[in-house]
Amino acid sequence: MNLIPVILCGGSGARLWPVSREFHPKPFIRLDDGQSFLQKAFLRGAGLSGVKEILTVTNRELFFKTEDAYREINSSAPLSSAPLFTSFILEPMGRNTAAAIACAALDICARHDAETMMLVLAADHLIADVSAFANAVEQAIQLAQQNRLVTFGIQPDGPETGYGYIEWQGSEVLRFVEKPDRTMAQHYVESGRFLWNSGMFCFKAGVILQELQQCSRTILDSAKACVEKSRQTSGTGIAQLNLDADSFALIPDSSIDYAVMEKSKNVSVVPCNIGWSDIGSWNALSDLTVPDQHGNRLSGETVLHNVSNCYIQSKDRMVGAVGVSNLIIVDTPDAVLIADRGSHQDVKQLFATLKKRGHDTYKYHTTVHRPWGTYTVLEEGERFKIKRIVVKPGSSLSLQMHHHRSEHWVVVKGMAKVTNGEREFWVRVNESTYIPAGHLHRLSNPGKIDLVMIEVQSGEYLGEDDIVRLDDVYGRIKETNPG
């Protein structure tokens, strides 16, 4: 039997703003042990018996960030000495879980066969008991081998209103229930007939396609049309399906629960107690931190006086608090969140407002990840912006030009290969070069260590969309993203 974990990695970053952003959503948040949610999901799938490949469905903007996260851990325990084969399906936009799973199943059938087992996992969940999770997967595989669609139901430990519920009997799913109010949730828990819906699934690739054919044929047909028009590439240890944007946009936006699971009569459930949480709010994330004697949960340097039941996170700055209680305080370099703990679910309203205004803090952090490395905005003002740019070994920015700004580059670590107009030359530590507006230029790092440089931009317009690419190894000629 061939088992492929399929990790769904996306999200908008709304509920855990300001640490999560649209291009740094929850899966990429790192916990106190240094690993991100995404890395934990990868290791969880990789640790299962017989797994040789992990398929990730993510937005194409997050591909290089995802690849970097996997590269950190794809040679460590519990994996074998040989890194796993990693495959990717790159979405041009979000179209919900039904589209993602349909495309994944079609891809798996094309590269493997219809009997291949898919284990669908979310990239942003936590599972404390990995051994119990592995046992639950074995049970799910046994049911899925009987051509069943299998979901994982979590034994509830209280009347949670933030989750959907599954009514079950034996191994059969009787019905799926939307998120209830507290009274109904209490009734569900007391009845003993309901489980939390975890959003994890197991089935054969061919079986989920058959069920899509019966329950949501439009989704399947449009997914097939999209995959047929999409570009498949492969290399040593990696495969990539880059979904065609125009046809992908035509796939109906629907969850796999609504499109298939709620309609099918062929659904089984594995009840499990695996220490599962979807960490859907700052309150849930704060629960991972041990409280002090006053109920405060602290991450970073703080000084407190008469403070109780607060969660305070600050990685870079000292936070002082006096005479407050029941607050969430989260400090990042460019945004601070202060919220009443009872209103933790309303953080997404702030995110929606920032997005409507087009404010950068809904989308990016001050440090932005690009395919070639990162850039950090150190300071900006009228007609100037200062960045710290890090280029990974062997990487290169696009050949580009700017209409409205000039740039001054100073190398502080490593050695840069620079194209500046008609000239190509090296710039070493404590050397610099000036790029006038309108000049073609490119920055490359052919060395073995990170290239670090300071860039000073000046001009009448310093927006990241003032860029014209002439050549790009990452296929971004038609895009307007920075670098």
Image: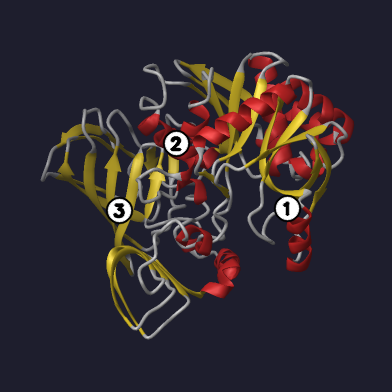
Marks 2/1: CA distance? 33 Å
First in sequence: mark 2 or mark 1?
A: 2
Residue 353 in view, yes or no? no
Query: Mark 2 Cα within 10 Å, few/some/many (few <14, many 20+)?
Result: some
The residue wearing badge 3 is 406
The amino acid beneath tag 3 is: Ser
Residue 298 in view, yes or no? yes
The residue wearing badge 1 is 164
**Which quadrant would the N terminus be assigned to in this image?**
top right
Give the structural element (helix, strand or loop) at label 1: loop
Of 223 and 40, the residue lying toward us: 40
- Residue 399 occupies quadrant: top left
The image shows residue 189 at horizontal and vertical percentages of: 73, 56
Q: Residue at x 36, y 33 (%)?
A: 72
Vertical position of residue 295 compared to residue 62: above or below: below
The amino acid beneath tag 1 is: Gly
Q: Give the side of residue 166 with respect to residue 471, left or right.
A: right
The image shows residue 173 at horizontal and vertical percentages of: 81, 39
The residue wearing badge 2 is 64
